[in-house]
Amino acid sequence: MGALRGTAGARKRVVIVGGGFGGLYAAKALAGKPVDVLLIDRNNHHVFQPLLYQVAAGGLSPGQIAAPLRHILRRASNIEVLLAEVAGFDLDGRTLRLKDGAEVAYDALIVAVGARHAYFHHDAWEAHAPGLKTLEDAIEMRRRILTAFEEAAREAILTGKAEPLTFAVIGAGPTGVELAGAIADIARRIVAGDYKAIDTRKARVLLLEGSDRVLPTFPNELSIKARRQLEELGVEVRTKALVTEVEARRIQVEGEWIPVRAALWAAGVAASPLASQLGAELDAAGRVLVQADLSLPGHSDVFVIGDLAALRDARGVAVPGMAAAAVQMGRAAAANALRHLDGEPGRAFIYKDKGSLATIGRNRAVAQIGRWRLSGLVAWLVWALVHVSLLIGFGNRVRVMGEWIWAYFKRELSAGLITGDRRQ
Amino acid sequence: MGALRGTAGARKRVVIVGGGFGGLYAAKALAGKPVDVLLIDRNNHHVFQPLLYQVAAGGLSPGQIAAPLRHILRRASNIEVLLAEVAGFDLDGRTLRLKDGAEVAYDALIVAVGARHAYFHHDAWEAHAPGLKTLEDAIEMRRRILTAFEEAAREAILTGKAEPLTFAVIGAGPTGVELAGAIADIARRIVAGDYKAIDTRKARVLLLEGSDRVLPTFPNELSIKARRQLEELGVEVRTKALVTEVEARRIQVEGEWIPVRAALWAAGVAASPLASQLGAELDAAGRVLVQADLSLPGHSDVFVIGDLAALRDARGVAVPGMAAAAVQMGRAAAANALRHLDGEPGRAFIYKDKGSLATIGRNRAVAQIGRWRLSGLVAWLVWALVHVSLLIGFGNRVRVMGEWIWAYFKRELSAGLITGDRRQ
């Protein structure tokens, strides 16, 4: 591809920052087009975020839901992948700056760096209640969940008794619901036979939601069904239960202190801090307020998509921070970037709602697709089909499908390894 | 099982420290016997070490070669698993001390904590050339190998040229040979199509061995065949090439400095430092000199097995630090522990040589089994069968076999993710 210090006289270059759903699908949309594409990510892999909670719960291995970006894009000879972290932008000079100081010039830029979990100004809580956005997050969450069981067992073995085993999942959006359901399934069914010193079925799994229902962005009817299914799984659901304090061994909910062995955060996301480097107006969650064609106000060559962007689309629909929306925005931004390079105006983005899905345990779910509302096993099958088909890589699809079929019949935590931090 | 502070009047308790091949098979041999068994490990999982190099090379996921110890032993109602780290022993008092200060009493003790890689008094080298004993080691090695490719690509993208891409594997025993072959296979074949800015096929893979041949513990005929197969794979093999200095970006071999992007250590192991806590005589590698029945001199209730033990068996055969030997010792120590608890003397251990195997690349190997010597594809098939059958867990066998079949036909680094440390 050659040096990136100037683009005069060469093919135009589109730089994409971020290899999640938005950035990856923008890149795929530019494969084979008469432009050079550089995809930059600080990780070498794309993560299928909807299944991160299954890695956190020890049911899937990281490798089954992730694939190296350059391998995904290998067949596109006009796309190169760069492992690097972006530090800032010079929008007038049309360059971006990497953390190591190097500069990268662009003719069009698509910024898709996504979101991080947010703690509503209580950043100290992060050490005690990790969130779930990256593979490392999932591996750390897995470590805490499994270590909680092991510590209870250790107490019972060494002293003859153990403090109660309580998990708290904070936030009942899809991530929180799915995590709580998975942990309850682990405690009640999967590992129940593996522990002799403790009865894991007595573990408490609390799901704490500040608003008045679980899955607040879903139709009320599905919130009710989801709550019932969670309670059947043994999850203690508390709505209108705002968490006011998070410490290493206990949390405070509506003024009441509850001792917990592991607290997991699923209560909020905020846009990447890189948003502030773009010099544009941000909304309350730190997302960039973009134009109708996804471009940055005043910079028709810069596009912001995915969880980093805040937009009401051409029909006034607020675009949600979901994978399907990021995919659509990625494709639209890629098309508009090409239009810009051709001297044409961009087209307004229209969001097509593909529905919402959330699993509860290993064979239940709630799903809303258009006007359809499904729950129970049927919803879970739809969920499984949708997610397997969206997985990148035929190999991964086979692996994950095989894993789910296996897990249905066998009680074992296929990827129930504690790796990483050793704090004993 | 109850508190472990005293054993008077209760069933006898056998404590096993270490859940590798020695400790795990000792535990399995005690399943259903009229004793209580406590297996202690600082990790919650058993790792199939012979395949660690495939995790380091991105071909297998950690979860495919490891399984939670308590899950493996779930059906034995007399066996409990404790996640803890042992700090020391009071052999006269028949207790051991955990890192957190708690004490565990035993009636018989089997110590199987294995080995770590050793740097011949150059401990500073470890930061620059990691070894391969645990899953975390493998993940870190994988990170360095893949990051080396990515850094070369980054240089080429940003500046138009890149320094040569050189890997050094230090030590040509089975681990080093297998690693070097795997890295050469990655560079020449698997990822060659994924990089556009660099030609990975030009990467150099050096295999450096201080003695005069690769696989020095194998018959000379197989050393010769292995060397040839490695060279066909593009590995530069240097024997009588002692490494005299290891720095972050270069190593010194027989006085010559060679710039490398990643150096990997496979040149030596030493027994766990816990050996010194047993108060017995150690050999030059730090291993405990045990009696013929695997017991500690002067303590017929304490057995030391696996890589931690140094022994010439009843027929004078030096027992090697290999998985098969550890398995046999585990079973023998378990039987002798039961004899001790019954007031009977222990029986001398006799090692049955099951042969040696080492793979070279994805479809070649050398194998010595009894008087049989095999090489090439036939040896690889034997290797594959042996290792798949020894894997713990039917699920893992299916996964790994499926992975190898898939890898045979597809060019993709199934688990080629960079996770962990982010140093950019």
Image: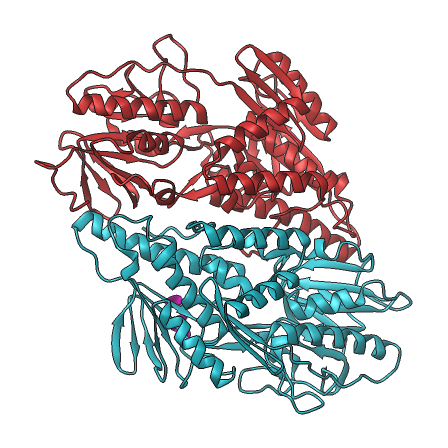
Chain colours: A red, B cyan
Q: Nearer the viewer, residue B235 or A248?
A: B235
Is residue A299 at all visible to an observer of this figure?
A: yes
Q: Nearer the viewer, residue B125 or B260?
A: B260
Tell me where residue B392 appears, x and y as whole percent.
66, 59
Q: Is residue A156 above or below residue A331?
A: below
Residue at the image point whose x is 26% and y is 72% from the top: B258
Tell me where residue A252 appears, x and y as whole percent.
61, 32
Q: Nearer the viewer, residue A195 or A121?
A: A195
Residue at the image point whose x is 75% and y is 50% from the top: A195
Is residue A208 at all visible to an observer of this figure?
A: no
Tell me where residue A410 appears, x and y as whole percent.
71, 44
Report which quarter residue B279 is drawn in: bottom right
Residue at the image point whose x is 75% and y is 77% from the top: B332
Q: Is residue B331 magenta?
A: no
Residue at the image point whose x is 8% and y is 36% from the top: A9
- Which range of residues does the magenta coloring cover? B123-129
